[in-house]
Image (cartoon, helix red, strand yellow):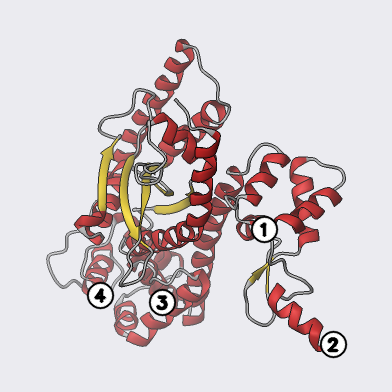
């Protein structure tokens, strides 16, 4: 039995009051995942990236509460994915490795539950690892815990989930049994592909074992592996050693003494770290393989070439994450302009976030706050939904939302700038 009209209004009021705390929880959850990702030493082999965060919309919350038979008072406490984040890894082992790092970083009392749909897939064929946790968004004397869900999948599992979400879940259709069977078959085929990819990864990631000091007066794979382990304390992957060896060969390097010497220079490692952080904005250091390759670049060319290499790799990583993020934000937009305006009104859609995904957001020239020009935003909404005249959208947006930017200033500074004229 569903909620009455009055009950729905009561839940909506509570939901709108909770939205600021949900935004805080999303920000803190993203920080937790970023910190875990920074602990992965070799990102060329253990790839994990966040490709989407979301706050559960009011309609979705209401639907789930009705499905679970929750009462008005339990509608928020009984749902454990008010905020969600999705992490996509290259391989199955990477999923479990990321999970292990995540669990180590969390207080035990913050973990609500864990579900391993890799080991035991859902009947639909869905495979992923889910962890539900509490994120505290309150103060030291007034804790407020928000339930969040972290989904960790492989690339192939994520592709399957995207297909089913777009074609089945989002469309709200009830598939015939034979088509459900085909989706399960597809999931099974992708699981086999994951196994093959894992075997390839295991072969590539085979660690070098070095028995002690080697001759650095010539270029050798053992020499490169020895320097790497001496510098970073862990053996390198076969992939990193091969790439470094090929770089040495292409540039005619005959000895490794200088590579060892530059990696001992703290100022070089710190400069590489700073260049990477400045370019990505991530706040965590590059993985050892990148630093190692930068050192080889510095020896075979010069230090400026090393910093250019780090900038290029950092830019690639940043662009990759930004592209996934934009795709995730836009994927959550409703199908009609009326539904879009309704979700703007109830604040389940963030105007600033959408504007950033459309690359039309700016920042206040005085305080740096993200601002959106209403006219530009309305035109973009009209274009997205195929509406010829955006004047009505513009008027409605001005009525529904506050805080629009004006002439490169946020609403606050635009107001005082006008008073000073």
Q: Check disc 2: other Cα within 10 Å, few if <14, some if 14-19, many if 20+.
A: few
Of badges 4 and 3, the one in the foreground is 3
For the question of whether residue 256 can be seen, the reply is yes
* Residue indicated by mark 4: 231
**Circle 4/circle 1 CB separation < 8 Å:** no
Q: Check disc 3: other Cα within 10 Å, few if <14, some if 14-19, many if 20+.
A: many
Residue 283: where, in percent of width, then height?
42, 72
* Residue indicated by mark 2: 421
Label 3 to label 1: alpha-carbon separation? 31 Å
Helix, strand, or loop for circle 1? helix
Residue 332 occupies which quadrant of the picture?
top right
Of badges 4 and 2, the one in the foreground is 2
Of badges 4 and 1, the one in the foreground is 1
**Circle 3/circle 1 CB separation < 8 Å:** no
* Residue indicated by mark 1: 355
Q: Check disc 4: other Cα within 10 Å, few if <14, some if 14-19, many if 20+.
A: some
Residue 57: where, in percent of width, then height?
52, 44
Helix, strand, or loop for circle 2? loop
Q: Compare marks 3 and 1 and give the one earlier in the sequence.
A: 3
Q: Is 360 left, or right, of 53 in this rendering?
A: right
Number of the label disc, if any, that sits on residue 39: none
**Circle 2/circle 1 CB separation < 8 Å:** no
Which quarter of the figure is the C terminus placed in? bottom right
Residue 196: where, in percent of width, then height?
33, 34
Of badges 2 and 1, the one in the foreground is 2
Residue 38: where, in percent of width, then height?
35, 64
Label 2 to label 1: alpha-carbon separation? 30 Å
- Residue located 45% across and 62% down the image: 24
Number of the label disc, if any, that sits on residue 273: 3
Q: Compare marks 4 and 2 and give the one earlier in the sequence.
A: 4
Q: Compare marks 2 and 3 and give the one earlier in the sequence.
A: 3
């Amino acid at each position: 039995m569903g909620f009455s009209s009055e009950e729905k209004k009561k839940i909506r009021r509570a939901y709108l009051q909770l939205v600021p705390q949900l935004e805080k929880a999303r920000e803190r959850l993203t920080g937790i995942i970023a910190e875990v990702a920074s602990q992965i030493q070799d990102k060329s082999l253990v790839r994990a990236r966040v490709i989407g965060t979301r706050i559960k919309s009011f309609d979705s919350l209401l639907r789930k509460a009705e499905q679970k038979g929750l009462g008005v008072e339990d509608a928020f406490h009984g749902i454990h994915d008010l905020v969600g984040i999705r992490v996509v890894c290259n391989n199955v082992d990477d999923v479990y490795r990321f999970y292990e790092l995540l669990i180590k970083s969390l207080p035990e009392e913050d973990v609500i539950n864990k579900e391993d749909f890799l080991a035991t897939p859902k009947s639909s064929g869905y495979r992923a690892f889910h962890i539900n946790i509490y994120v505290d968004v309150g103060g030291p004397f007034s804790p407020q815990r928000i339930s969040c869900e972290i989904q960790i999948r492989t690339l192939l599992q994520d592709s399957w989930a995207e297909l089913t979400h777009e074609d089945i879940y989002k469309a709200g259709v009830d598939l015939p049994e034979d088509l459900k069977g085909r989706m399960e078959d597809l999931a099974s085929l992708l699981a086999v592909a994951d196994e093959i990819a894992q075997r390839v990864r295991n072969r590539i990631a085979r660690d070098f074992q070095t028995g002690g000091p080697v001759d650095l007066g010539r270029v050798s794979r053992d020499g490169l592996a020895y320097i790497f382990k001496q510098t970073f304390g862990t053996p390198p992957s076969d992939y990193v050693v091969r790439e470094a060896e090929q770089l040495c060969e292409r540039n005619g390097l005959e000895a490794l003494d200088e590579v060892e010497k530059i990696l001992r220079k703290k100022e070089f490692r710190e400069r590489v770290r700073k260049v990477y952080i400045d370019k990505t904005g991530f706040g965590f250091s590059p993985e050892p393989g990148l630093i190692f390759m930068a050192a080889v670049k510095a020896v075979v060319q010069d230090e400026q070439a090393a910093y250019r290499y780090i900038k290029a790799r950092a830019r690639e990583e940043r662009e990759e994450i930004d592209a996934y993020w934009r795709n995730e934000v836009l994927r959550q937009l409703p199908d009609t302009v009326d539904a879009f305006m309704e979700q703007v009104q109830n604040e389940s859609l963030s105007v600033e976030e959408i504007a950033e995904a459309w690359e039309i957001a700016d920042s206040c020239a005085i305080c740096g706050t993200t601002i959106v020009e209403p006219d530009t935003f309305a035109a973009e909404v009209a274009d997205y939904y195929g509406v010829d005249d955006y004047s009505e959208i513009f008027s409605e947006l001005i009525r529904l939302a506050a805080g629009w930017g004006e002439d490169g200033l946020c609403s606050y500074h635009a107001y005082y700038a006008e008073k000073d004229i």
